[in-house]
Image (cartoon, rainbow, N blue to C red):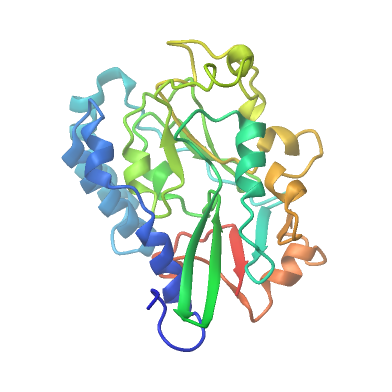
Amino acid sequence: MGIFSKGEFTEKDWNHLLDRALPDAKQEMAKSPYDSELGFNMAKDARRVINGSLSLEDFHKKYSSSLVKEFGKEYVSETPPRRTGKGPQWAMVIDLRKCVGCDTCTVSCKAENRTPPGMSYNIVLETEVGQYPNVARINLPRPCMQCEKPPCAQVCPTRATYKLDNGIVVIDNDRCIGCRYCMVACPYGARSFDFGKSYEDEMIGFNDVTSPEYGVDRGERKKGKLPEGTVRKCSFCYHRLQRGEEPACVETCIGDARYFGDLNDPNSKVSKLAASPRAFRLKEDLGTGPSVIYLK
């Protein structure tokens, strides 16, 4: 028997599928040179800030001295400026009934962002449900959720992770020190650490260029050079958006299961789909407010 209960798949079932694929937080932090317990505690309390059970002021009071001790001059205490809410609010809608689990989104994302071995910004979680002969294959694509209230940004000690006015959560690789606290805080497992691996042995020319993520051209991929040693993630292909193009996963989806647009525009396709009774967000109870909306 699959992971789903009898009858319709529920949001609880989709969340369960996601949880099964989350990385082991202790294993992730075991590779970090920084205080693991501090990271775990901050991640836990960041979610309390988001759900309103802990104030932002009390969060900072609780951790500021520990952060100064652990990170020294790397620690940045200032709070990022509030977003204005003006302009587009980029969002993605994924119709789960249309997704056939072909993984084209995963492949196109890797090609576009030139992610190294072991790293995929966009994955498709799969499971089989039912009993023979009544079985079905279930697919759940998972990019970064670009949360309205991102816990990853809350725990970042250097403020390398922050949210743009257009709703996209970005990473300043020049400020990221690779502590991986954000990876522990992310409830969706959407962040990865760049260990410097390469496909060069099997794909000649892989190291010739690094994807211009966030519009920054970093040239060839080289040992000891950014983004190696930092945390990376999906940005809705922000560099493509700046050129007026859709994210690579949207453009290449063979089933047209993905829609991309401005949630602030009531006439946009994504706004109308987001209002559908089929619409839901993963782990809505956390209050993170994902900008990725699914149609069940």
Q: Is residue 174 left or right of residue 95?
A: left
Name the residue at 45% across, 10% down: 223
Q: Residue furthest front?
A: 133
Relative to the observer, which residue lies in front, 281 or 149?
281
**Vertical relation: 265 (above or below) 120:** below
Residue 92 at x, y percent in the picture: 66, 56
- Quadrant assignment, res 101: bottom right
Answer yes or no: is residue 219 visible: no
Which quadrant of the figure contains the C terminus? bottom right
Q: Is residue 24 left or right of residue 107?
A: left
Q: Is residue 107 left or right of residue 51?
A: right
Residue 221 at x, y percent in the picture: 55, 14
Answer yes or no: is residue 165 visible: yes
Q: Is residue 140 left or right of residue 151?
A: right
Could you tell me how many numbered marks the image carries? 0
Residue 11 at x, y percent in the picture: 47, 75
**Vertical relation: 107 (above or below) 221:** below
Name the residue at 67% across, 40% down: 108
Relative to the observer, which residue lies in front, 60 or 262?
262
**Vertical relation: 121 (above or below) 158:** below
Which quadrant of the figure contains the N terminus? bottom left
- Quadrant assignment, res 236: top right
- Quadrant assignment, res 153: top left
Name the residue at 72% across, 50% down: 250
